[in-house]
Amino acid sequence: MTTTPTAPAPGVATSPVRKVPLPLVARTLTVRRVEDLSDSLRRIVLAGPELEGFASDGPTDHLKVCFPAEPDARPVLPTLVDGRWADVPGVVQRDYTVRTFDRSAGEVALEMVSGEHGPAARWAAQARPGQELGLLGPRSSKIVPLDRDWYLLAADEAGVPGLRNWLDRIPATARVQAFIEVGGPTDEPPLPDHPRLEVTWLHRGDAAAGSTTLLPDAVAAATFGTELGAGWVWAGGEASAVRAIRRHLGVERGLDRGSFAMTGYWRLGVAAFDHHSPEA
């Protein structure tokens, strides 16, 4: 079944993303549990006394994860001076979305792509309880619009935690269409239940992650009408794919900038890609 999303109707008020600053804190936490969500995605649950004061209220909130040089060593964290951080020798860090934060249980969960490419994926592949990770942030929460009639979500494996966060929050009355690119059927993680969710899984097979146009092509093929009311489009994944989606929405569809937000989380061939860069 195919969802037919629509551009916002003329005159409909927008609900822009609201940024709530948070104090920047560095923490060392311990792995409490590890869960395999698919062949390529693992849920890492962290806990520890340094989690005190942690906050995260938006689906796309992210932090820097600092990995140890060796799996069972203590991670090296950046130095904080007057609320700003500076790298020190030995820091190995990558950005990750906060998947869930359970204040009552004293747990924060991250979802990591595992594999042999890069220090983060290799660490995730062997992760087990008792190991330590360093967390820096989040430095803000982004409060998103939850008053729309429909939502279109697009993500690859790196964006799946954010997409799952969106599904936790979108009201049951809204229609949701999700396009998700993964390697194959065994790479499909479970998604939160939503009564009006329609999912299209895009399998790239043997092609390398970030090397196809599956995700932007799927979004471009969606029909944008006017019958469903006001909507919101979010995308998170490889930077070239996200830029193509953004260009299609803004230039070819003429969608109002108050109706979409997206970020290039990584870029093919670039280690430790900065999602704040103009290429994101």
Image (cartoon, grey):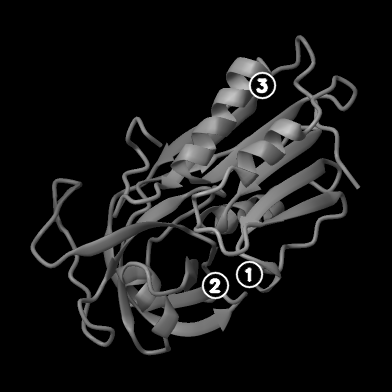
Mark 1 touches mark 2? (CB < 8 Å): yes
Amino acid found under the numbered disc labelled 2: Ser
Q: Which mark is residue 198?
A: none
Sequence order check, earlier mark of 1 and 2: 2
Instruction: Tell me the residue that label 3 is attached to.
Output: 14
46, above or below 256, in the image: below
Q: Nearer the viewer, residue 124 or 270?
A: 270
Q: Residue at x 78, y 53 (%)?
A: 199
Q: Secondary structure at mark 1?
A: helix
Can residue 54 be seen in the rendering of this structure?
A: yes
Query: From mark 3 to mark 1, how far is it between C-alphas?
Result: 35 Å
Categorize mark 2 by other alpha carbons within 10 Å: few (<14), some (14-19), many (20+). many
For marks 1 and 2, give the CA distance.
Answer: 6 Å
Query: What residue is rendered at 66% in x and 66% in y?
Result: 184
Q: Amino acid at mark 1?
A: Asp
Task: Using the image as rendered, state which of residue 279 and residue 57 is in the foreground.
Answer: 279
Give the farthest residue toward the top.
11
The residue that disc 2 covers is: 40
Residue occupied by mark 1: 187
Q: Is residue 271 left or right of residue 187?
A: left
63 on left or right of 168:
left
Quadrant in the rendering for residue 10: top right
